[in-house]
Amino acid sequence: MLSIRSRGVRAEDEPTDGRPVLSVRGVKKRFTTRRHNTTALDRVSLDVREREFVCIVGPSGCGKSTLLNIVAGLDQPDEGDVLFAGKPVRRAGPERVVLFQEPALFPWLNVRANVEFGLKLAGVSGKERHARAQRFIELVNLSRFERAFVHELSGGMKQRVQLARALAVEPRMLLMDEPFAALDAQTRDVLQAELQEIWSRTQTTILFVTHNVREAAILADRVFVMTPAPGKLKREIDVTLPRPRSPDNHAVVDVAAEVRKELEHDIYASPAPEDSYVI
Amino acid sequence: MLFRIARMALFYAALIGLWQLVVRMEIWPRYLVPGPRDVLDSLKTDIDNGLIPHALKSSLQRLAIGYSIAFGIGMVIGIATGAWRWVDETVGSLVLGLQSLPSITWQPLAIVWFHLSERAILFVVVMGSIFAISISARDGVRNIPVLQKRAAQTFGARRLQLYRYVILPGMLPSLVQGLKLGWSFAWRSLMAAELIFVTIGLGHLLSVGRDFNDMNMVVAVMLVIIAIGLAVDRLVFGTVEAYVRDRWGLSQT
């Protein structure tokens, strides 16, 4: 287990090679319904460096999606700050594009027009838009489906389109909210492999939320283990295994087991269902 | 496809045959229940002498103007009620109430306000179709999946861009039903209004036919009204529906 270094989550002892591109400081978020008053996030802090791949792993309902939405600017924290490239995040924007679990594609647009969507909003000219869309559609291996409509695509293909649409605007950071959770195991394996390759080629910074510990072990440079009620980052685990990583690689399985052990500790004490994370 | 056409042809042939048979039995006098032959002759004459084409043209013109106005105002009301809760709770409830009024009940007001004029007819047509359109536009705005709006936001879409690039195109599946309903209400309202106002138009031809006891003409004009209704439904809305099915998939329509 030489490949794993782990330590506490206190940011002070982080060896920074370069300033963090994302800095979350003491973020608190409460949700109030008529009967319940839940603390979704309790003083969560984390840094993500440029070109880093960071995974947040936790069971359903631990607040990891809430954290992602706050980083995206789709949601506001009750307390604490989110700094992106040194500036506080106030609203959502194309420098931090979100990939959702359910593919939020536009059914009236074909694959290419979907991929061009962000570029169109940014006012990129038609010709340039077209060329860029084509390049990213190629990157996600969907060239044959450029003219297909959303309902004609499989779940995995839809997520590829979402990825291409996000990459096309060349965001500084990708925020991925369990993008492969709704896919079958085989498709998930393929997409994890593709994402590793795409990430190494584009060198985008990625914050990836998942309940799948093996997925985190395959993808991440660093894994944050998150525990529910209230949502807290419990532990940080560095993963320094060489890439590309196969899901069956022993070292990957070891990392996954390590993460899982951390989660299991809390899972029985928490109100989340037992099957809410998988290996 | 060929089989379906043949089946349809057979159905109509049987229907006309039955009609002919009933007329032949002479249960009712010929001038009350005309036969298919007489109606066809009357249709031919009235097309040839320009009566029907002339009436058709002015009816369709009125319809185009009235429906366009209803579409414009209906979309504005619908989008506003879809976008803001407070508009929905005020204007929206009024629209729901007015929707239950048969359009011809606007006619007394129309006559008082606009007298027996072109504008009075247009008023009835607009009132007949506007609410169906605005209700479906409201539903269209409401039915856009939240995730699609959030996706647009993460690409930096501002409110106006959200409407232009997501909500307006995305509301089509809901909207098309209301547009179709609005069109058929407009067509019916127009015929009802023309029956009462003295003016050139298909509805007016019906009342002329009644005045001259010319049932051949009455039925001939009714056939024209049906034909226009079917044609617009199939050609215009059929095309839009096919477009929606093509893009959204079958599950949505």
Image (cartoon, grey):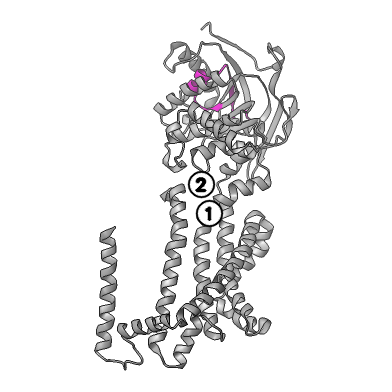
> In this orientation, does residue A271 appear?
no
Residue type at tag 2: Trp
Is residue B221 located in the magenta-colored stretch of the structure? no
Residue type at tag 1: Leu
Q: Say which residue appears at 41% left-offset and 81% top-offset.
A: B48
- Residue identified by numbered label 1: B172
Compared to residue B107, the image places residue A178 above or below, namely above
Q: The disc numbered 1 marks a residue on which chain?
A: B
Compared to residue B179, the image places residue A63 above or below, namely above
Query: To which quarter of the image does residue B151 belong?
Result: top right
> Where does the image place residue B46, in percent across and percent down from the top left?
42, 83
Q: The disc numbered 2 marks a residue on which chain?
A: A
Viewer-proximal residue among A61 and B156: B156
Q: Say which residue appears at 64% left-offset and 26% top-offset.
A: A172
Query: To which quarter of the image does residue B235 belong?
Result: bottom left
User: Alpha-carbon neighbours of circle 2 within 10 Å: few (<14), some, or many (≥20)?
Assistant: many
Viewer-proximal residue among A177 and B211: B211
Is residue A220 located in the magenta-colored stretch of the structure? yes
Specify the farthest residue to the top: A2
Q: Say which residue appears at 43% left-offset and 51% top-offset.
A: B245
> Where does the image place residue A116, in percent across and percent down from the top left?
56, 37
Residue bounds of the magenta highlight: A209-231
Residues at discs 1 and 2 in contact (Cβ within 8 Å): yes
Viewer-proximal residue among B125 and A138: A138
- Residue identified by numbered label 2: A108
Disc 1 element = helix
| Quadrant in the picture for the C terminus of chain A | top left
Left/right placement of residue B194 relative to residue B77 reads left
Q: Say which residue appears at 46% left-offset and 42% top-offset.
A: A149
> Where does the image place residue B237, in percent across and percent down from the top left?
46, 61
Give me the disc on residue B204.
Answer: none
